[in-house]
Image: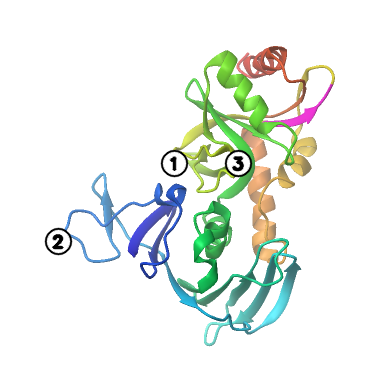
Amino acid sequence: MDKLFQIGDFIFRLCCPAEVTPPENFMKFEIGWGLPGEREPGLSEEDGVLKVPEYTYHIEVSDYLPEPDGKIVARRPDLLVFQRQAEGDGQLLESRLIGVKGRPDPYACYRETSANRGEILLMQDELRDLHIDPLFTSLLALERRLVRKDQMVLHCAYVEYRGEAILFSAPSETGKTTQAGLWEKYRGSRTVNGDRSLLGKKEGRWIAQGWPVCGTSEVCHNEAIPIKAVVMLSQAKENRAEKLKPGQAFPLLYSQITVNKWNMPDHLHTMDLIEDFLRSVPVIHLGCTISEEAVECLEEALQSLDA
């Protein structure tokens, strides 16, 4: 396979052998090559605009994984991150041994070879699991590229209502999918992604964008919609909505955004992006039950934003 993809503002080329099959949700972000015979490989055109990939990933299948060069800067049960300085310009390049929690050995090695190229070695016996969205998407370290384009991945249920996005965010098992379902049932909203959204700016306004991972919801669409509000959820015996001040909202939002804390420049830039986001996007805390009353409570709070 040799195809172009676009996630948010990041356009990249993905080259891999035929035995490597990206998940269906990932393929929703393919942008193609343009008309046959009219484009050189690596170029695409949409709406009259020529799109050129800024990064190329090469995936190969292997029976073993090498030990990456460099200093270990992060260690988790499912991830080992290395950094090294590139020859010549001295920029920091990253490598990763990528695993799955509960399994003893990594299934892939990601290695940046330059500022615009990455190589991935994938264990042969893991090909059968590549249909699982997070296993494939984790190969590409996308958040590392996207933060440099002023974009962030938020853990949330991304819902469209009357042409705007409502983002229900909270730790896992708190009720994001449940509240999104209540809005579908009682207000006719539509879930765009049940587990993630890519936050970015277009013409000065923050928008929610599609992401190729959607958790157990199995709802994944590649759409960009202006954001009405972020709703931070907690379970409660009574329904209560409160608009948060930026200082109150910051730690809640930060806790649900993918952040590479081992990379200080990217980490600091992410915090700057969150501050910018909070200057223009309201964040509401909703303590809620599983009921239509929870929908009514939030609806009233959202309407008050326009008053």
Boundaries of the magenta span = 231-236
Q: Earlier in the sequence, mark 1 or mark 2?
A: 2
Name the residue: 29% across, 54% down.
32
Q: Tell me residue 15's x, y (percent).
A: 38, 68
Residue at (54% x, 59% y) in the render: 129
Judge the density around disc 3: few (<14), some (14-19), many (≥20) Cα neighbours within 10 Å. few
Mark-to-mark CA distance, 3 and 1: 17 Å
**Distance between mark 2 and mark 3 Cα atoms:** 40 Å
Mark 2 Cα shell of 10 Å, populated few (<14), some (14-19), many (≥20): few
* Quarter of the C terminus within the rendering: top right
Q: Secondary structure at mark 3?
A: helix
Q: Percent position (x, y) of residue 189?
A: 53, 21
| Predominant secondary structure, magenta span | strand
**Residue 262 sits above or below residue 276 on the image:** below
State left or right for residue 85 relative to residue 294. left
Residue at the spot 72% in from the left edge and 37% down from the top edge:
170
Q: In the rendered structure, are the residues bearing label 2 and label 3 in contact, judged by CB atoms less than 8 Å apart?
A: no
Name the spot of residue 155 as percent of width and height, x first. 65, 43
* Residue 96: in magenta span: no
Amino acid type at image mark 3: Thr
Q: Residue at x 72, y 46 (%)?
A: 254
Give the mark, 2 or 3, whose residue is nearer the N terminus: 2
Q: Which residue is mark 1?
A: 222
Q: Which residue is labeled 2 in the image?
A: 37
| CB under 8 Å between discs 1 and 2 | no
